Image: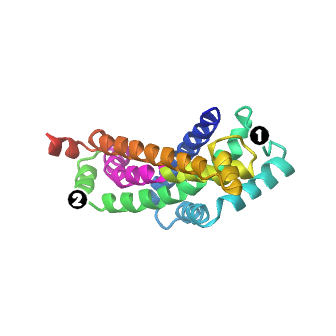
Amino acid sequence: VAHLPATLELAVSASAVSVVVGVALGVLSAVHRNKPIDIAARIVALFGISMPTFWSGILLILVFSVSLGWFPAMGSDGWKTLVLPALTLGLLGAGFIVRMVRNSMLEVLGEPFVTTLRAKGLAERDVLYRHALRNALIPAVTMMGLLAGEMLAGTVVIETVFSRQGIGRIVSDAIMAKDLPVVQGVVLFTAIVYVVVNALVDISYAYIDPRVRRLQN
């Protein structure tokens, strides 16, 4: 229990990085389709999905800790020790969200209602962010809920690489010591969090898309 706040702090921070980076790059990629910013966003998504977290974590340590000295390479004291682990874990989720948001935005931008809004003279910013993005967020929010379990599971590797004290580090040590009750307890806790987060995601659909609210009524 004493190590739980550090793990939740890491998981929440990584989720925030995933959402902010993923949604921003996904929207820019869809709006500027086949342009340099679209190509760059897809490359970031490809690296985020393909690169193992332990390898990307080591690369970030080499660049931002060893070479530049901006952030500490290990520990769990203060916000500076949280930056590199959160980026490492967050970029993994961001890769999936970029692809999901891009595909959803491209599909929505081709819908007739978008053409109608533009024909009526609505500002392009309002078309994109008030209408198109809101409709495109449903699949992305579903992906965010699925990534909640990925964030918690990923803390096992991240906390080991960055020598952070947390639930993930405890699981890693328990696996090495073959302490099955500890491993089972953490797996059960992760499953409960996963169920709760996905229940909240289902509830959020009604607030994101009014059509869902009308169907419920």
Provide the major secondary structure of the magenta segment: helix
Q: Which residue is mark 2?
A: 112
2 or 1: tag closer to the N-terminus: 1
Q: Is residue 151 above or below residue 7?
A: below
Left or right of residue 18: residue 206: left
- Residue 15 in view here: yes
Amino acid type, callout 2: Pro
Residue 75: x %, y % from top left: 77, 40
Residue 214 quadrant: top left
Tell me which segment is drawn in magenta.
123-148
Q: Residue at x 69, y 40 (%)?
A: 82
Q: Secondary structure at mark 1?
A: loop
Q: How many marks?
A: 2
Left or right of residue 69: residue 126: left
Which of the image's four quarters has the C terminus?
Answer: top left
Q: Is residue 125 magenta?
A: yes
